[in-house]
Image (spheres, helix red, strand yellow):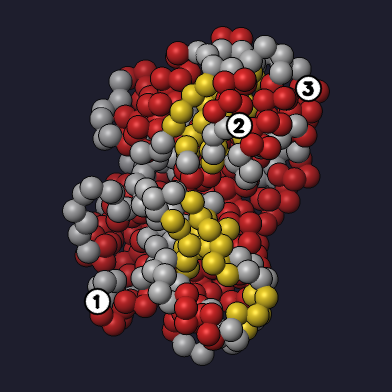
Amino acid sequence: MVEVGLISSSSVVIEHINSICREFEYSTKSWPTLNDFMEAEPDCRVVIVCASEKQGKISDNAAECCQVAKAMCNDAFVVCIVEKAVKRDQLPFLKKSGADLILNDDQLIEMSKLEFLLTQELKVKFIPFKLSEIRPDSEIDFHIYHLVPHRGKFLPCSQPGLLTSTHLKKLQKISEFYINRRDLPKFRAYLESRPVVSAKDLLSRCRIRFLSLCVAYAELVFLLTDQAELGSFERGTELLGQCKALCSDLVSVVAEFDEVWDVIDQSAIGNLASVERSTAVATYIAVFGLRMNPEKVESAMVGALMSDIGLLFLNSKILKKMRAREPLLDAEYAQYIRHPMISVDLALERKLQVDLDLRKMISMTHERNDGKGFPDRPLGTRIPFESHLIQFCQELDARTLPILGEFRRNPRHIRAEFVEEAISDVDRFGADFCQQLEKAWGTFNEETVRHPYSDDAENFVYDVLTRHIRK
C-alpha cells in the first residue's frame, strides 16, 4: 500500500510532497498522468490531484481524476489542488466528483495545511482502544479492526452485532485493536451505556470524550481550510457549537476525576508545531482552570482550540524549522508572531460566532505581563486571565510532549518543575495568575502525580488518537 499518491507532472510539487513524506515517514509515489495512475492500479490512503497549471495541470479532467482516485482506492482521502483564480462556483462540482478537500495551489507549498491533513488521515483515521472496554456477550454497532503491519492495512476482526465471550476470547490473541474514526459516536454511546463503577470506567469515559473533541475539532479545521467551504456558515457554526458542547462534556468528567494525565500525555506522537496539540492544551485548561477560575474554563478551552489555527496559514518552511528547533530568520519570525491574528481573521472570514471577548483572548495568547510577548505587547493589566491560562497550558504541553527518538523523562516530574517555575514567573503571567496557580497546585495530591508507567497505573495508560503505527 502507498500512503500518499500524487497525480502531477511538476517536479517542484513532487519534491515538496516527497520531502513531507520523508520527514513523517509516509510512503509515497507519483504519476504524471491519469492514465499512468490507472495503469498502475495503486492502493493509496491519500491521493493528491494537482489541477493547477503551474503545478503540473491534469489538462481539464480534474473531476475525472477525483472520480477515478475515489473508485480505485476505495476509502482514500482525495485532495484536489486548484488554481487560486478558479471560479468559486466550479468547486462544488469537484467535491461531488470525489474531492474530500480542495486547496489553492499557493497553499500547497506556501502554507502548512497539507502536513495537518496527512497526519489526520494517515495517523488518526483509526483510533486505538483497549479490548477490556468491550463487555462479553454485548451488542456492538461498529467494526473492530486490527492492523496487519506488513500490508499496512486495517482489517475488520469483528462485525456489528452480538460479540460473544467466545469470540472475545479469540480476539485476545491480537495485541492491538482499533475503531474507525467515523464510528467514534457509536463507540462512545456503547461505553457510556453502562454505569461508572470504577476509576477505570471514569478514565475510559474521559478518554472517549477527549477523542470526540479531537475528531470534531479536526473537522472544524478541515472546514476552515477547505476552499470549497468558504460560505459554509451553518456548518462552521454547527461544528464550533459541537466543540463547545464537547468541551463542556469533558469539563464535567474532569470535575469528578482529574486523573487525566495519561489521556493528555499520550494524545499525540511527535510535534507538527501546529494545531494537532490544541485539544490536549484544552484538556489541561480543564484540569487547572477548574481549580483557578471555574467560570472561565470553557471559554478558555474554546480559545485554545481557535488560537493556533493561523499556524496552518504560515509558510511550511517556518513550521519545519520549528519542528527541528532551528532559529527563525527575522522575516520568518515576523510572519510567525502574526498567527494569532490570522486565527481571528479566519474565524471572522468564515462568519463563525466569535464575540469580542473571544477575539481578544485569542489575539493575546502569546502576550506577557511585562510587555515582551507578541504580537502587540499590551500592558499586563489588559491581558485576559484566559489568555494567560492558554499560554501556560501550551507551554506545559510543549514540555511534556513525547518526541519520537528522544529519551522521555517522567512527565509528572516535568509538570511539577514547570508549575513551580510558572508560579514565580510574575513577569510573564502576572501576580494574580501566579497566586491562583500556586493555590490550585496545592490542591493536587500525591495520587494525581504518580508515575504513569508504574504497575498500579498500567491499565490507565492509553496510546490515544495518533499513536505511531508500525509500518
Q: Provide the residue designation for mark 3.
A: 90
Q: Provide the residue designation for mark 1.
A: 454
Q: Provide the residue designation for mark 2.
A: 79
Residue 409 or residue 145, whichever sits in front: 145
- Which one is closest to the eye, mark 1 or mark 2? 2
Q: Position of residue 128 (x, y in %)?
A: 47, 63
Name which quarter of the figure residue 450 lies in. Answer: bottom left
Q: Position of residue 206 (x, y in %)?
A: 51, 71
- Which one is closest to the eye, mark 2 or mark 3? 2
Q: Amino acid at mark 3?
A: Gln
- Which residue is found at the position 33% from the left and 49% from the top? 398
The residues bearing labels 1 and 2 have C-alpha atoms spaced at a distance of 43 Å
- Which residue is found at the position 66% from the left and 71% from the top? 160
Q: Amino acid at mark 2?
A: Val
How many numbered tags mark residues here?
3
Q: Secondary structure at mark 2?
A: strand
